[in-house]
Image (cartoon, rainbow, N blue to C red):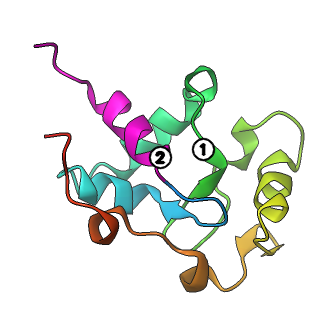
């Protein structure tokens, strides 16, 4: 059986983030059993364009759009989030906890 690499595991989690919800790089890393790998999750998001991954739904632990410079156009990440009903002000999600989706609480790891 072929082993799934870390980036592919990240993409599988990110694809589960519901419309109108966001999660953090750290929450994905923690869910995958690599709590100190939030930065690596960010690198995965940077390389996710061809993988049909909703990378705009992954932000930092404070709700900041830290990955926005990796999207085409200046405000594409914010526009995509706003199209899902998420308010963004000064590059930060308003009511972040209301929109936060924690993969560790939503489903058990089936990818191990």
Position of residue 89 in the picture relative to residue 24 (left or right): right
Q: Is residue 104 magenta?
A: no
Q: Dot 1, crowdedness within 10 Å: few (<14), some or many (≥20)?
A: many
Percent x, y of residue 4: 23, 24
Q: Which residues are magenta?
A: 1-16
Q: Where is mark 1, residue-wise?
A: 55
Quarter of the picture holding the N terminus: top left
Image quadrant in which you'd find residue 98: bottom right
Give me the residue at 32% from left, 36% from top: 9
Q: Image point 55% across, 26% down: which residue? A: 47
> Where does label 2 land, which residue?
14
Where is residue 45 drawn, in percent x and y?
53, 38
Q: Quadrant of residue 96?
A: bottom right
Q: Considering the numbered disc 1 on the image, is that residue within a helix, a strand or a loop?
A: helix
Closer-to-camera residue (4/1): 1
Position of residue 102 relative to residue 75, above or below, is below
Q: Identify the mark nearer the N-term, 1 or 2.
A: 2
Instruction: Decide which of 74, 77 is in the foreground and name it.
Output: 77
Q: Is residue 4 magenta?
A: yes
What residue appears at the point 76 percent right and 37 percent down from the top-left corner?
A: 71
């Amino acid at each position: 059986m072929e082993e799934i690499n870390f980036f592919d595991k990240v993409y599988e989690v990110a694809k589960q983030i519901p419309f109108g919800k966001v999660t953090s790089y750290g929450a994905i890393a923690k869910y995958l059993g690599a709590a100190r790998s939030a930065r690596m999750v960010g690198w995965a998001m940077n390389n996710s364009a061809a993988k049909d991954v909703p990378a705009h739904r992954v932000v930092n632990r404070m709700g900041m759009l830290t990955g926005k410079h990796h999207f085409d156009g200046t405000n594409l990440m914010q526009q995509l989030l706003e199209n899902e009903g998420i308010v963004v002000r000064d590059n930060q999600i308003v009511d972040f906890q209301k929109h936060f989706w924690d993969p560790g609480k939503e489903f058990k790891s089936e990818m191990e």
